[in-house]
Amino acid sequence: ADSLQTEMIGSSFRIYDQVDSTQNVAHELVRQGCPEGTVVLAEEQTSGRGRMGKKWLSPKGKGIWMSIVLKPHIPLKQTSQLTLLTAVALCRTLRQELGVAVGIKWPNDLLVDGLKVSGILLESSGEDDRLNYVVAGIGISVNMEADDFPEELDGKATSLRIVCGRPLDRIQIIRRFLEKFEELYLLYLQQGFSPIRTLWEALTISLNRPLRVKTYNGWVEGTAESIDDNGALTVKTRDGETMKLYSGDIQL
Ligand code: BTN
């Protein structure tokens, strides 16, 4: 019962002590022809990447730093659906396994009481509107302690250990997450985005409350009521305009 119960996700598994970024390793493995479902894990990343050019702190042994290679046959513009799928799989795993009240902040941050415990970064490659492959990067602050976070993350980030009040078994979380991920990914390949969207909407903290969206000319205030078929957040701004967000940042 304690082994990994998946068929495709994790069929090829690479574990490293130290890498620059598991994303880079995964892209390289794709160039070498690795199969779909290849998982790359590292104890430590020296240049972990976050969204929008940010750094992702990845101290040795303190978290789960992981990338998964996927090769679904979908149009490029549906790639955001996979971001939301990854967030749903992780959110449900942490709720079920640890009983932690995690919520999803659009598009893919996992928060507990407003503090970030995990982030997801999707990097894709495609041509002629077809997705070629995607690397889904997952960072989870599992066993970090207050001292492990830099000052600028004060009041912004936390770890599962801090939230649960005890150190946690990373292997167990990885197994359960990969199983949940495979289950949802297969559902997605068979039935499309609609069941994933329903799950995402039930787990998010970003709908039906005031929020601010960062645009090219500053912050705009509004409310989001739904995500659309491609996974874009649909925001009604205060001056009655409707905006679709495919990526970017919001403030709640
Ligand atoms: C974010 O919230 O900005 C996304 C963070 C994603 C971090 C993970 S850790 C594993 C993978 N390798 C990276 O360099 N980044 C992702």
Image (cartoon, grey):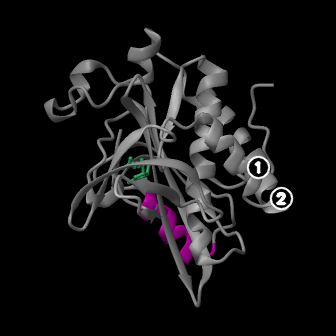
Compare residues 226 and 92 and report the one nearer the observer: 226
Q: Is residue 153 left or right of residue 66?
A: left
Q: Which residues are magenta?
A: 23-33
Q: Dividing the picture into quarters, in which one does residue 100 lie? A: top right
The percent coordinates of residue 10 (x first, y second) are: 68, 50
| Residue at point 16%, 35% (across, down) | 152
Is residue 3 in the magenta section?
Answer: no
Mark yes or no: residue 161 visible. Answer: yes
| Residue at point 80%, 54% (across, down) | 186
Kind of element beneath mark 2? helix
Asked whether the residues under the numbered discs 2 and 1 touch, taking CB atoms below 8 Å apart as contact, a structural biologist would say yes
Residue at which label 1 appears: 195
Compare residues 251 and 57 and report the one nearer the observer: 251
Q: As drawn, which residue projects farthest toward the top? A: 165
Q: Is residue 16 left or right of residue 7?
A: left
The percent coordinates of residue 55 (x first, y second) are: 26, 51
Q: Dividing the picture into quarters, in which one does residue 58 lie? A: top left
Q: As drawn, which residue projects farthest toward the bottom? A: 128
| Residue at point 59%, 48% (across, down) | 86
Looking at numbered disc 2 in the image, what kind of residue is underneath it?
Gln
Is residue 26 in the magenta section?
Answer: yes
Compare residues 227 and 114 and report the one nearer the observer: 227
Q: Is residue 124 left or right of residue 86?
A: left
Main SS category, magenta section? helix
Q: As drawn, which residue projects farthest toward the left? A: 151
Residue at which label 2 appears: 191
The percent coordinates of residue 140 (x first, y second) are: 45, 36
- Location of residue 223 with respect to 129 vertically, above or below: above
Looking at numbered disc 1 in the image, what kind of residue is underneath it?
Pro
- Location of residue 168 with respect to 193 vertically, above or below: above
Kind of element beneath mark 1? helix
